[in-house]
Amino acid sequence: MSQTLKGKHIVLGISGGIAAYKSAYLLRLLIKAGAEVQVVITPNGKEFITPATLSALSGKPVVSEFFAANTGEWHSHVDLGLWSDLMVVAPATASTIGKMASGVADNMLITTYLSAKSHVMVAPAMDLDMWSHPSTQRNIATLAKDGVEIIEPSSGELASHLVGKGRMEEPEEILRRVEKFFRRSDSLKGKKILVTAGPTYEDIDPVRFIGNSSSGKMGFAIAEEAAARGAEVVVVAGPVALQLKDSAVRRVDVRSARQMLEASQAAFEDCDAAILTAAVADYAPETCSDTKIKREKTGDMTLRLVRNPDIAATLGAMKGERMLVGFALETDHEHENALDKMRRKNLDMIVLNSLRNPLAGFNKDTNQVTILRSDGLETEYPAKSKRQVASDILDEIEKYSKRND
Ligand code: PMT
């Protein structure tokens, strides 16, 4: 077996479900692929598989309690969280998923999860009714929103002898996902990427503005995914309430389209690619009043608007060999309008999301996109979390730039 995971530190979290017997085989696969694995098991997990088996396979004592039984030594979840390059929770029971989603830190597995700086994957395993219960689905959605990668359970015969969705994914498939993560984790090393995110606000007076409902979620997800792949990332963000989870991403906050243009142009100078998710206001008031406009004095009013600069088109005109990716949010003639924008703005790719799809667009945690490339290739994706959409977009960008090498 090739040493695809040589030198990688993996925390394998095991919670109390019958699928824990498969974790021993997963552990063996990870070790054979060259990873150093630290097992953290919940008290219930130990009822399904013994720590002796797991420590024999991993070559390390298994961590379960906050204090070691024989020496009383404190197990530092903080150190473990920092040590790990990846944390995989397999199996993840409904209870463990619920605790992870709400931060109930009553065992070593959850405290390690809360301290982990690394990427986290969960492989759920439970009965079909537990899996489809709204509470489990809510918790899964929360984890996905927190950036946790969900390895969906498969369908088949369950421990209850019922047949349906809930079986933990097979260890070989989990290994494949782990290998893919590490392959991905330096696929953009050495690249510099600009992302624009959020809305722009065009001030009318000190208390009023023209804006839109963009939350920045799509742009921040792309920035974080690009950073996770090793890129140096700068986000030029309009007014959004979000915080970046990855402190390595450089953030430049702006308010108006003009400020966004200035910051984006400066950052684009030494970038290899730009991904423009921002919902930029196309128009701004011609003047902005220094003082609050008074209703009583003004009566009806007419606001004269002037066109804002087009950031995408400006970067398109200066891009040279650099890759430029835009977004299109349309209500009608979506496909046609997206293609037209790609051509006019000199983009290499445009990501079309529709306002008509309830799982796509402003302020949603999910998006449903079609990626159109300037060479005519098009791929339509199902609705996914914005982080997974970010991953699809970056996969597509990587494929496209390799084609041009
Ligand atoms: O932020 P979220 O709540 O997560 O929502 C994400 C999103 C819906 C805002 C995002 O997915 C999206 O679709 N962004 C583009 C929305 C948009 O304004 O599209 P547009 O069709 O108006 O613009 C086309 C492209 O040109 C976009 O890449 C835009 O950033 C860019 N543009 C537009 C106008 C302008 N003056 N300058 C620009 O750079």
Image (cartoon, grey):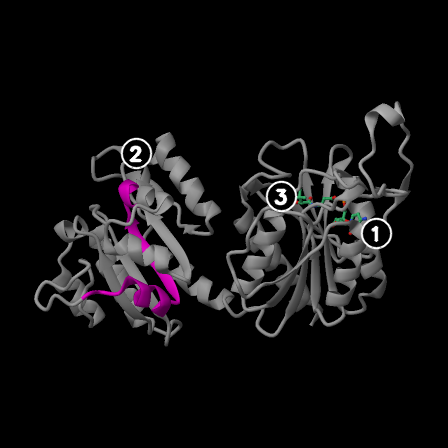
Q: Nearer the viewer, mark 3 or mark 2?
A: 3
User: Along the horizontal axis of the image, is 305 left or right of 66?
Assistant: right
Q: Amino acid at mark 1?
A: Asp
Q: Nearer the viewer, mark 3 or mark 1?
A: 3
User: Along the horizontal axis of the image, is 359 left or right of 371?
Assistant: left
Report the disc number at residue 130.
Answer: 2
Which residue in the protein does label 1 denote? 310
User: Along the horizontal axis of the image, is 266 left or right of 252?
Assistant: right
Query: Dot 1 surroundings within 10 Å: few (below 14), some, or many (20 or more)?
Result: some
Q: Is residue 182 above or below residue 295?
A: below
**Marks 3 and 2, Cα distance to the nearest angstrom?**
32 Å
Specify the segment rendered in magenta. Answer: 74-96
Which percent across, then down, holds residue 366?
55, 41
Which residue in the protein does label 3 denote? 215
Which residue corresponds to the image point at 41% horizontal and 62% vertical from the top-left?
Answer: 117
Q: Earlier in the sequence, mark 3 or mark 2?
A: 2
Callout 1 secondary element: loop
User: Along the horizontal axis of the image, is 374 left or right of 135?
Assistant: right
* Quarter that holds the N terminus: bottom left
